[in-house]
Image (tube, helix red, strand yellow):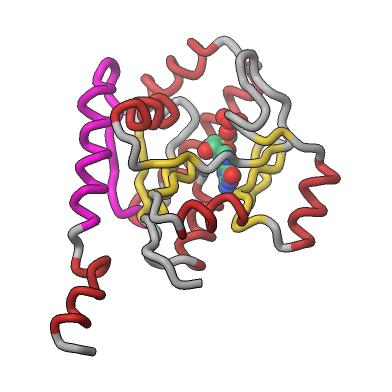
Amino acid sequence: MSCKRGILIVVSGPAGSGKGTVLNKVFEKSKDFVYSVSATTRDPRPGEVDGVHYHFITKERFEALIAEGGVAEHTYYCGNYYGTLRTVIEKDLCEGKNVVLEIEVDGAMQIKNKIPDALLILVVPPDFATLEARLRGRGTNTEEDIKNRLERSREELKFFDKYDYVLVNYDNAIDEISDKFISIIEAEKSSTLRNKDFYNKFFNI
Ligand code: 5GP
């Protein structure tokens, strides 16, 4: 399908890095982005709404979608499936919107391999102690869940250099970090890689 495609933006970061809060601020400040609502088999947390935060579906339905090729990437994380629905991202990218996937590293690496022009951004906490404090502060995770997520964070950060940009999410700096995020995308729009049309037109290629 021919279309002026938007940028596919992959955002990862350990649980507690605050990537969700950064993204909420970005969406508040700019209408240039759409959030790709993932599907998951985990239970909704208090306040989470089906179709808004996630499409909450059963394990059977998720496995059927994988078999049909309906997910662009997926992972099995802390006992549950998470994945990106192919239909959701294709439509928005084709309409020229910048589509944001908030996904963990396994999924991010799948996207990087399949869609090389995807832009990968890693949101990290300033240090490990801050990460732990944030996870405990949530009060919605069990002790075992917290341990799993901290262990997983160390593993995830090993993928640091596979990402294009890193954003250190200090406490109380959400305005600054969200502005940086928007600036990165603005700069990317002017990258030579994303403006080959101009070059081709100039030289009548
Ligand atoms: P949570 O249970 O805290 O909402 O999410 C757990 C992890 O799953 C987070 O790191 C989140 O980024 C990731 N995640 C959410 N949706 C997707 C998805 O569609 N695909 C992949 N690969 N990871 C996801």
Residue at 18% of width from left, 52% of height from top? 187
Residue at 46% of width from left, 34% of height from top? 14
x then y, percent, for residue 177: 25, 30
x then y, percent, for residue 77: 65, 41
In-front residue for pair 106/86: 86
Q: Looking at the image, how many numbered discs can be counted on the residues? A: 0
x then y, percent, for residue 143: 63, 17
x then y, percent, for residue 122: 36, 43
In-front residue for pair 32/60: 32
Q: Quadrant of residue 204?
A: bottom left
* Outermost residue toward the left in this view: 202
Q: Quadrant of residue 69?
A: bottom right
Question: Which secondary structure is most common in the magenta stretch?
Answer: helix
Depicted 12 relative to depicted 54: above or below: below
Q: Is residue 145 left or right of residue 115?
A: right
Identify the magenta region. 162-189
Quadrant position of ligand 1: top right
* Outermost residue toward the right in this view: 60
Residue 152 seen from this side? no
Residue 47 seen from this side? yes
In-front residue for pair 92/85: 92
Q: Is residue 137 left or right of residue 85?
A: left
> Is residue 12 shown in magenta?
no
Residue at 37% of width from left, 64% of height from top? 4
Residue at 23% of width from left, 89% of height from top? 205
> Is residue 187 shown in magenta?
yes
